[in-house]
Image (tube, helix red, strand yellow):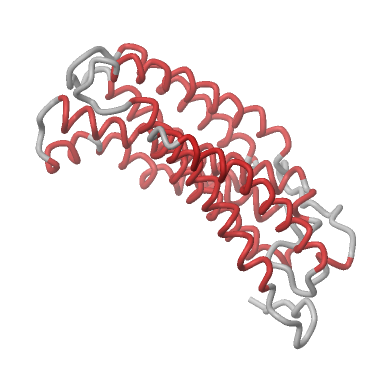
Amino acid sequence: MREPRRARPGAAPDRAGMVLAPLTLGGLVWTVIAAGHGHRDGAAATAVLTPAAGTAFVLAERRAAAPMVPGGLLRAPAFLGAGAIALIMNLVTNGVLFVATLRLQQAGDRSALVAGAMLLPMAVPPAVLAPVSGRLTARFGPRVPLAAGAAVAAAGSLSLLGAGPGGGYAALLPALLGIGIGDGLIVTAVVAAAMRAVPPAHAGLAGGFNNTARQVGTALGVAVYGAVAGPALHPEFAAGLHVLAWASVALWLCALALVRVVPARGRTENRLAGPAVRP
């Protein structure tokens, strides 16, 4: 593959972006964790500082000679839509994975090995279906596997409403399997959608941005789902799972709605004018 030309030979690194990006992402995660643990003062402080850091990051990217994320990409619906779907996928998946592990080990008094084996219905489908998703994406474009995956995962998440007190496995199995199948259909297609949403010179950046969105989703999912469900030995844990079931379905439906903004088959986002996005 040919390496694209640099944004500007000898341009200084985007130091402001290097500082503001982790402040924004870290502040977002910290706010959720602090709120979940009852640290209201800390959560309130970071809730104010995080949007300020995010705004400063966007402004810095517009002015930087070699920005981490060119400003035009931050205004491209297809690019941001693919990132949002990736974030939702990891948020729900790892949030459910976390509370399922608590239920199996704490409430069910199972060992880590046994609980891990019982989580395989979520782990195996992505490995098996990722190549299938790639073939579907190549033939029909990313929208078909993205929509199918979000729908299957939403149906699986709904089954968490059947979870009662204790460490029973029957109510978790449909959710684990549905989310695992949904992820398997989404994971390849969402990266393809992100890379199709930008000019070829920014394909690598698009893949990195999409992966970053997934990692942010993972951190938020564990923080939010853990805070809502609480310890598995508490009687309120089952009620928390029911709340998370509806929240998960709502998030998957948001992902399903976002499918409309990602590139269709053979379409690449070319409306990224301006010097900030030139290769």
Q: Residue furthest right?
A: 274
Q: Residue at x 57, y 43 (%)?
A: 45
Asked where in the image residue 174 lies, by quadrant, the reply is: top left
Camera-side residue of 147 and 94: 94
- The image shows residue 83 at horizontal and vertical percentages of 62, 46
Vertical relation: 133 (above or below) 66: above
Identify which residue, 20 or 206, lies in the foreground. 20
Work out whether 168 lies above or below 49: above
36 or 91: nearer the eye? 36
Residue 117 image-quadrant placement: top left
Q: Nearer the viewer, residue 97 or 19?
A: 19
Q: Residue at x 40, y 22 (%)?
A: 156
Q: Is residue 183 visible?
A: no
Q: Quadrant of the C terminus?
A: bottom right
Residue 199 rendering spot, x and y as whole percentages: 76, 61
Residue 188 percent coordinates (x, y): 52, 48
How many numbered callouts? 0
> Residue at position x 54%, y 55% from top?
212
Q: Is residue 130 left or right of residue 263?
A: left
256 over 130 or under it: above or below: above
- Please report the residue visible at 45 percent of the width from the left and 19 percent of the height from the top: 155
Q: Position of residue 31 (x, y in %)?
A: 51, 42
Left of 265 or right of it: where is 42?
Answer: left
Relative to 37, is 2 on the left or the right?
Answer: right
- Farthest residue to the bottom: give it: 10
Specify the quadrant that holds the N terminus: bottom right
Direction from residue 120 to residue 159 in the image, left or right: right
Is any atom of residue 211 visible in this view?
yes
